[in-house]
Amino acid sequence: MATTLRMIVDQVIAPVPGPLGVYTQALTSALIANAPTGCHVEGIVSSPSVAEVERIDALFPGMAGLYKTSLARRELTAAWQLGLTTSPGGGMIHAPSLFAPLRRHDRSVSGDQVVVTVHDLSPWLHPESLPPSQVAWSKSMLKRARKHADAIVVPTHALAERLGELARLDDRVRVIGTAPRPGLARPSSLESSLRATRLGLPSQYLVTSGTLEPRRGVIDLLEALGRPGVPEIPLVVLGPSTWGEVHLANVAEESGVDPRLVRAIECDDPIDLAVVLSGATACVAPAHDDAPATGLIEAFSLGVPVIHSDTATHLEVAAESGISVTVGSGGYADRLAAAVTSVVEQPAVAERLSVTSTDRARAFSWRDSAERVWQLHADL
């Protein structure tokens, strides 16, 4: 008899799939491609339109089936939050987030399993950065996971430790890493050149990602680039140009950086993203806290020199493959400035970091992540 793993794939058809949609697509595809003999993957989705079903079929051609709930996404989200019985049934269910049918069950009797995933702890550590409804939902669902989830997957040991401080989860937390998004590959030289021109990329630049929210560190990086003696190099920010009433050009000018040297780009196309990353002199990850480190992994996969803050997550993911900069209580911008200067002005440093990035990239693959998920459910 075939063994079925039922994956909640709702996020890939959300109005804004975002990073969670990318994760869902990548992991689901890898689970299908690396299913053990006699095993297959089915999908679970909130009540979809015909077009949405066609999109799911196109994304996951090897999927064995698709369970369509009777409720639309908004109603299903509320129902699962309240623990109502509306559900896709039992079996082995894997959720790429906390969005899951968490209810009382005994897997030793029924064989049912529910595994959820936690990617970051912003709803608990930085609730002011999110809508109140999202914070309340996340906290409610983690409480349900603490009671009813058979395992909770996190991408790093650093996050596992922080999560353990927030909720008593015993030995149910499992660390299963991520990998670069599907399709993130440098195209031919000609196509790279054409895309770089279309995107307006300069010949030399730094790249970072995030918003202007202070804890993301982009403001610190701009202050670093405005320090005396730091090479005048453009900065490409992968993210929005505004955060509330704060605008990237204004922050640059206040930091002593020519606003014409700073621009924001939002890349949904993975090939465009690969062009932006691979053309950078260095990728800088200056976040103050343990935000997801997928950006580091994607930079490593393209052999880009990496400069990163010394958060626990960054240190774990980088494993000494980049330049670590201490956030500390003062002088962070000056330390970032020194790191940037060394990479920009010393080709040998940049070359060494490119080599260590390439080496580190070998530690991350969706195949490995999928095999670990299959093993987790087998262990349960």
Image (cartoon, helix red, strand yellow):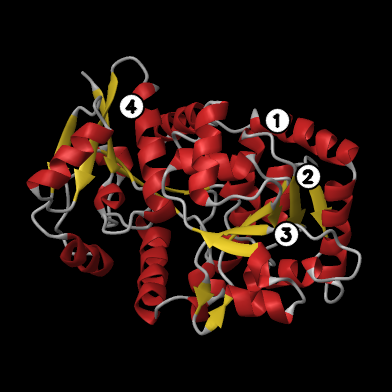
Residue at mark 4: 32
Cα separation, mark 1 vs mark 4, equals: 27 Å
Which image quadrant: the C terminus? top left
Residue type at tag 4: Ile
Please say if the residues under marks 3 and 4 sit with CB atoms less than 8 Å apart: no
- Answer left or right for 192 relative to 221: left
Q: Count residues near mark 3 (Cα–Cα under 10 Å), then give few for <14, some for 14-19, many for 20+.
A: some
Residue 293 screen position, x and y as percent: 61, 51
Please say if the residues under marks 1 and 3 sit with CB atoms less than 8 Å apart: no
Q: Is residue 177 visible?
A: no
Is 28 rendered above or below residue 15? above
Residue at mark 3: 311
Please say if the residues under marks 1 and 2 sit with CB atoms less than 8 Å apart: no
Q: Count residues near mark 1 (Cα–Cα under 10 Å), then give few for <14, some for 14-19, many for 20+.
A: some
Comparing 281 with 91, the one in front is: 281
Quarter holding residue 246: bottom right
Residue at mark 2: 322
- Nearest to the eye among marks 2 and 3: give it: 2
Residue 300 screen position, x and y as percent: 66, 38
Mark 1 lies on a secondary structure that is helix
Q: What residue is shown at x 89% (from left), y 36% (from top)?
A: 348
Q: Earlier in the sequence, mark 1 or mark 3?
A: 3
Cα separation, mark 1 vs mark 2, equals: 11 Å
Which image quadrant: the N terminus? top left
Cα separation, mark 1 vs mark 3, equals: 21 Å
Q: Earlier in the sequence, mark 2 or mark 4?
A: 4
Cα separation, mark 2 vs mark 4, equals: 33 Å
Residue 111 screen position, x and y as percent: 28, 37
